Amino acid sequence: MTYPEALEYLNEFTNYEKLNSYDYNRSFRLDRMRKLSSLLGDPQKGIKSIHVAGTKGKGSTCAITYSILRKSGFKVGLYTSPHLSSFCERIRINEAFIKEEDVGRLLDNVKGALSEMGAEAPSFFEVYTAIAYLYFKENAVDLAVYEVGLGGRLDATNIIEPLVCAITPISYEHTDKLGHTLREIAYEKAGIIKDGLVCVTAPQEEEAMETIKDVCKRKNAKLVVVGRDIKFKELESAEEKEVFNVSGMAGEYLALETKLLGAHQVINAATAVGIVESLGDHGIAVSPKAIRVGIASARWDGRLEVVSKRPHIVLDGAQNAASARALADSVKTIFKYKKLILALGVSSDKDIEGILKELLPITDSVVLTKSRIAERSLDPARMKALITSKNSVVTSNVEEAVRQAKSKAGAEDLILITGSLFVVGEAREILTGSGL
């Protein structure tokens, strides 16, 4: 099928990324994913892979790991979600996104298998994950890096057999689905830990760390802890780059540089170092030079991304209170500005009060908006009712929000567009595509 036909067909499947309310344990079914993959010949098997879960930073950690492995000379696949502008962004090999015609071609294969699935239809994410499995298999990648979509234990990516898994910082998110305590949420994330293998974890709150330790002990998995087994130290935080040291298990890496901004990216980079060093247990060698060059060349759009100056326009997908706190701290540390105009749009299942608590103190005025894509977008008027300390305006779409924010900003000001990645993606397309 053609790419437009493929998108139309994909839209027939339930897309939980856009929905607010559903039964997590009934909607996410690994047995269904295993059946679909089996009908396709289990393309995920035989691919050496890395699996990353977490609340914050899992996409960035995947991107850094992917970049290091590419600089090591490997042919590497990367599967992430959601996308900012195009579905093709989710699947890439060595910096090249999957081609539109390949999405249509591989979806034809999946469609044939679906005819044998019976009445139980898979979700959109399961179908697209199957496309990733097929694409990496037919292109014979040396390694594949998979980002968990939601949770971990029941995620469609959790039928792979990774060499190493990693868990980035865990905080409160999707509490109606993953659990109301950090222990419950961590249990879902730790569902990717496999028997006898290595799990690298970023620094965690005590409750989450204890859960990860318990799962590793039960599964006889080796636990590598960033901050204990892998040390890091931030040296410089500026608008152009982060500079930091990492002392790993296999070596010391001094004055590393990354264009991914914010202290949290230093933690993500240290986690990626732990991942690639752990591959040595499987005979996969990664040189210190590849680590240095890979970290320096890693890109991850829409995360503290500067898309314009005078005024500064910064994009970031902060979707919970912990991410918003890290964002606020980074903005205050990295950027110099007179006023900050916040353009915000979030999904209705997010902790909007927690997000506002972190962002409003650094904000001079607020422009509220919503994505045109996500059905679970929170009505901007509901957000406005929660804001009493700042001047705020409501807009009906992201394009209007961008115009409003730019009209309020002087050359020395900063516009921060954040919240849902759907909002960030739409803003990025507007700002980098049409030149508003």
Image: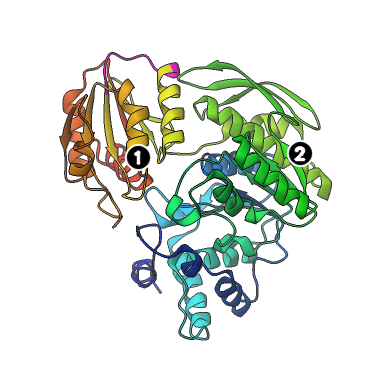
Q: Amino acid at mark 1?
A: Gly
Colour basis: rainbow
Q: Is residue 342 above or below residue 93?
A: above
Q: Residue at x 45, y 46 (%)?
A: 173
* Residue 307 visible in the picture: no
Q: Of the two numbered discs 2 and 1 on the same chain, state the one appearing first in sequence.
A: 2
Give 190 or 317, whichever is nearer the viewer. 190
Residue 356 in percent (x, y) is at: 32, 32
Please state if 372 lies on the left or on the right of 71 as rendered: left
The disc label shown at residue 419, or none: 1
Mark 2 is on which residue type?
Glu
Q: CA distance from mark 2 to mark 1?
A: 33 Å
Judged from the image, the secondary structure of the residue bearing numbered disc 2 is helix
Image quarter hosting the C terminus: top left
Which label belongs to residue 277?
Answer: 2
Q: Is residue 6 magenta?
A: no
Front-lying residue, 380 or 343: 380
Q: Is residue 95 left or right of residue 351?
A: right
* Magenta part of the chain: 333-340
Instruction: Give the residue drawn at x 54%, y 70%.
Output: 29
Q: Residue at x 25, y 52 (%)?
A: 372
- In the image, residue 333 sits, relative to residue 151, either above or below, namely above
Q: Nearer the viewer, mark 2 or mark 1?
A: 1
The quarter of the picture where the N terminus appears is: bottom left
